Amino acid sequence: MRRSLLSVLRGFLWAALALSTAASTSFAAQTSPPSASVSPNGRDLLLDLGPKHGLWGYASAKNIWTYLHNLPVKSAIRADVNRNGLADTVIDFGAGMGIWALLDNGTWQPIHGTSAKWIIVADMDGSGRDDLIVDFGDPYGIWIYRDFTTWVPLHGTTSKSAVAADLDHNGRTDIVIDFGDAYGIWVYLNNSTWQNLHSVSARWMVRADLDKNRQDDLVIDFGPTYGIWIRYNNTSWAPLHGTSAKSAVAADVSRSGFRDTVFIDFDTAYGIWGYNKTGGWSQLHGLSAKGMVAADTDANQQDDIVIDFGPPYGVWRRANNSSWIQVYGMTTTSLAAVALPNRNPGEFPSTPGEASRFLTQATFGPVDADLSRVSQLGYRSWIEEQFLRPRVYHGTYWDTENAIIKAASGGDRTAFGDQVTNSFWKQAIAGNDQLRQRVAFALSQIFVISMVDGSIDYWDKRTRGVAGYLDMLDDNAFGNYRTLLESVALHPMMGRYLSHLGNEKEDPDSGRLPDENFAREVMQLFSIGLVQLNLDGSPKLSAGQPIPTYGPDDVAGLAKAFTGWSWYGPDTSEGRWYGWIEAPDRNYRPMQAYPAYHSTSEKSFLGTTIAAQSAADPKASLKIALDTLFYHPNVGPFIGKQLIQRLVTSNPSPSYVERVASAFNNNGAGNRGDMKAVIRAVLLDPEARKPDIGSTYGKLREPILRLSAFLRAFNARSTSGKYLVGRTDDPSYSLAQSPLFSPSVFNFYRPGFVPPNTDSGDAGLTVPEMQITNEVSVAGYANYMMFALINGVPLWGSNKGDIKPDFTELLSLAVTPASLIERINAKLFSGAMSDSLKTSISDGVGTINVPTPTATNKAKVDEAKLNRVRFALLLALASPEFIAQK
Amino acid sequence: MNDINSSRREFLRRATALSAMGAGAPMALNLACLSSAAAQTATDYKAIVCVFLDGGNDAVNTVLATDSPSWTRYSALRRQISSSIGLMPPGTARNPGAPGTNQKLGGVLPIPPLTAQTGRSFALHPAMTEMRDLFLARRLAVVANVGPLIQPTTKTQFYSRSVPLPPRLQSHNDQQSIWQSFSPEGSSAGWGGRMGDITAGLNGSHRILTCISASRSAVFLAGRDTLPYQIDTDGAIQIGWDWLFGAPTATQFIEQVTTANRSHFLERDQASVFARSINTERDLRNALPDKDLVGGTTAVQYAHPVTGALSTNRLAEQLQMVARMVSAQLALGVRRQVFFVSIGGWDFHSGQNDSQANQLARVSHAMSYFDQTLKTLPTGDLSASVTTFTASDFGRTIHSNGDGTDHGWGAHHFVMGGAVKGGDIYGEFPVIGVSDKKTGYDNPDEVDRAFLPKISVDQYAATIARWFGLSDPELLSVFPNLKNFAVPAQNLGFML
């Protein structure tokens, strides 16, 4: 939704409303043509699952969930807003956002900036088009949005509730409005005549056709004193029940063609009962509902009753008045029957392989649960759901383990790098917040710190700060790049790693100048890069040469801006600055400013000048420095292209980079640096979803992602629950890559690495991961996988085999190699394994003989089956087809 | 199945080179292209070893000018109140009880060069005792103030930008690439690899063993045709074994799936690496001498310069692997080899005192271990056949940032071996000092507070490559800027 459009519209219409309110304060009649019928119930459901989970649409007939928004919903109703014959949905998001329409084509259209007391849909003027009737409350009163084109005042008095019903069966919708105790209930008949229906205000009113004569009836609950009555055909009153009820819906549950049954919720005392004229009363359920709507959820022209029973039951539907089916296991904050947009086929996988490809890019490896989820939600909604997944903290893992290690060692030892590494793996293998973790992993390869370095040190308790750094990346993965950049700049581990923690201002006497390390790398690696870029990531040229973004003077100037920051603590004493005095949380709390050490001289960089400061102000300097970087036009293409490379493909087309960079520059609401918009753009781009694979598309799976894909595909679980993978950096005997363990700030590999003397290199292609691929590492990787298949992970040591894949399903296929291979194909290759690889694996597996089972050879048979599974998987995992993600 | 891809590549390249010359080119010229020069007729063995110091070593504290004017300015620039990075003057005794690392280490180690530089005297960092000894034994030379240059460049020319300059100065990855390949990141061929292109024909069926890294991937070793080969410090690694998982010919199937010919480039390239890994491991399996014959695990341990604690020196481990390969050359029938080893941890923005002393102690120990080992290989003394030299991203700033130094440009480097005219300093040692507008002091050898190189990487490398056997035309083709330097200066003269 676009706020800017909304506010324009709001201003315009508020003025219109204010003008006409005065003219319509009496029950003045409007003359207009006769009207048509009420819109039928919707088929689809709108479920507001609360602020954590957001607003979802559910088309149960197709079993499709769609994420719609993260705003709370006040009310929603089905209507044909754009007059194209297809139903749309009008949603009132409450004060602030107002009323919007979700059109059948999936776009959002603003209706009005003011939230409503109630909204109903009718065709009052007989135009054959839906009108919206809205009570905006005081001081605006009730308005008609005729044909969704013109606002017409209906009444200046706000009311309590309303229903639309064709009481005289003439094709024009009449409106029944309850004005409350002061005025009672009135009927606005045929868009012309006000009739008083009753002087008593209602608890609720429902439109029904109990006598099945196509002339609508009303079921009205007048409260405890009078009970529930039926108004037949706008002519006669009949009592229905002496007990007042909580709510009701009327529906056609017998496919009679009439809304002939009313379901009334008598609260916890009696539960929910249904009534129709022929069958009388029957109990639907003993529980009371939190929310209840009628909808034809299975699209068979027969209404179902959808009920939110509240926790712990969640939402259920009574299909065709016969069976109970759970819709969702959680309760809603609002539930409505609506019409959802037709899904865009491009946003849904058309095969399991397409879903698997997507999850290979967006997670640490496809698992069955995510495959069905993405098929159900579509790519976009799957991403939105991931945005809302709850956070898990690596710092918590480290702290928990630290307490255990300390206690076991009598306080001698602390947790260290292993606990960061293992927490990473725990989330990678078993976490539900896959997209966040995967993006944070990508960010950890752009905003690099490394436990290789002595400034952080794998064996030191300072690694608590590295867990905090990973948490910081998680925090910002779905936030804004500007905040991310500042969080990186002020993180004490980055401060240690690039030595701007404790960076002192220049000293003219000694000639000492500020440390330039961070100033240089924040430009070269974290924001703008070395040369000026076009939006599509190509270098701008001057006389055929790239144009540098900065020179030594910019580095020196920016270095001064990054002086005066050091450890967090409750004071800014000298001991705190130098680190002699330690606050217990200093390893992960953002660094704090120490004005005494901040350069006050003029600082010039990248065309920006921070004027000399009379009083040192490190925060002000930092803000200008980071803003200057943030607004540099290079950031979008520079960061965007690297995220594409980490998730999707090593050599994106310039137009793909441009689309992602544009999303960085403007998320659609005028905001720059919105990481969610960038992630959507990366993963939903046609070049990500429906590329021409050809001979060059894709990327090498990083070794970490190979292991994670394997472990996830076969549902590996940790015996200890701690996922004790340990370090995997050794190229000879492990994976040549361990998280947060790159050899330098230049990451494991460079985004521009062109592998020499390869087909890719000859074609001018960038293949970053080839930088850690060599004769040693390929052997190290294959052998690592071999031992992982034998021992589980880790391969050796006291934690050996803590993580073990589950081969139950594959073992059952071991005697039929073709089925075994197809299962591996689906699990690890997105269904794209070549015939020649299938043949090789099949031949290889065939050399392992499975004896014919006898009464005594079960152990031998089982061993042979296990050998077949392991060998098939080794051949699959070692194959270049698996290693190249396409 | 010996390196078919590589041979195919070489064949195709030469075919292309021929056709590019056009049908009218004289036959003689075509033939000259095919038999590429003197190196290919050599029957002796020669190897070079590049020791790359990742991160940019601080040359100012590695080789020091100790004459009075130099030392005075050095002390003013580097000796400060807290965590000073200034080293102690020559002759200062070690003082293990002192608070500062530099005081603990004692004074810098004098190295009188065979060729005097007027008014100058020199020393090495106090942690480099073994390399001091190698210098005095004339097995080690110093080459002063080397760095990437397009052509000779003066300070005035630098500031007026009146001559072309190397791109992306001070950027780690780009300067590493430029040192190795004369082109910034993204470059596809380095000068080690180009030398390999020219000489690989001498290595018979083992072309793959021409350019070898015992460290990481490096563009230095990539030629236009030559592929770098990576080896673990323990030797080549076999994938799986037969009867693995009960499969009698498991390795055959592993080879089949990992090396299968595929149409997708990423898969092809991956398969090529697997093929080289598997084939070469098969070739080397029985050819490499046992580690114990070249010092085992004890000789590769070094002593921490302050605490004296022993631990494994990863650089020495890599050089141990190189020594094993050198020892195997006769058995394998290879004649020319280019090796790459490296050690990270040289980006001394802070805490330089401790880290640089430790790093230089590793280098010093590793170089000495290597020289000693080459002299006593199971196959004889090959130390005169192997030339080892240092390289690094860049030098660092002459001034201090408090407890460290920032990115610079020119730096001093070392060349070691039996074919090196050691015990001398080649190139004019730069003036120490940072120009200061206030005092009017101007150092002609300094730009942006770092050394302006006097010797280009091209000159430094070409001197080594000439010894390796490259002809003048070949040198000019491998080293793109060499032609911009006067002919006498194209050979710095430190090789026999």
Image (cartoon, grey):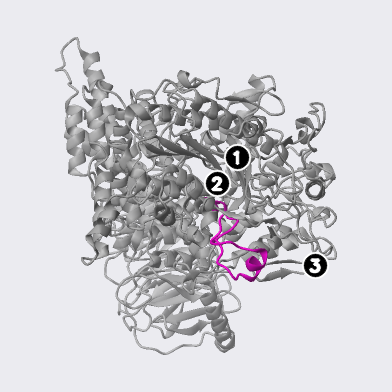
Farthest residue in the left direction? A852
Q: Is residue B18 above or below residue B162?
A: above
**Coordinates of residue A780 in the picture (x, y in percent):** 39, 32
Where residue A211 sits, quadrant-wise, is bottom left
Task: Determine which residue is flagged by label 2.
Answer: B493
Circle 3: element type: loop
Q: Disc 3 residue type?
A: Ala
| Left or right of B260 on screen, residue B295 | right
Confirm whether the magenta stretch covers residue B174.
yes
Q: Residue at x 32, y 33 (%)?
A: B280
What residue would you read off at disc 1? Answer: B141
Residue type of the residue flagged with mark 2:
Gly
The type of residue carrying mark 1 is Ala
Q: Earlier in the sequence, mark 2 or mark 1?
A: 1
Are there few (<14), some (14-19), or many (20+) residues within 10 Å of tag 2? some
Instruction: Please name the predominant secondary structure of the magenta segment in the image.
Output: loop
| Front residue of this view, candidates B470 and A478 | B470
What span is colored magenta in the figure?
Answer: B148-176
Whether marks 2 and 1 lie on the same chain: yes
Circle 2 or circle 3, nearest the eye = 2
Q: Residue at x 68, y 42 (%)?
A: B63
**Please, which residue is most extreme toward the top here?**
A856
Q: At numbered mark 1, what does the secondary structure look like: helix, strand or loop?
A: strand
Q: Are marks 3 and 1 on the same chain?
A: no
Q: Which residue is mark 3?
A: A612
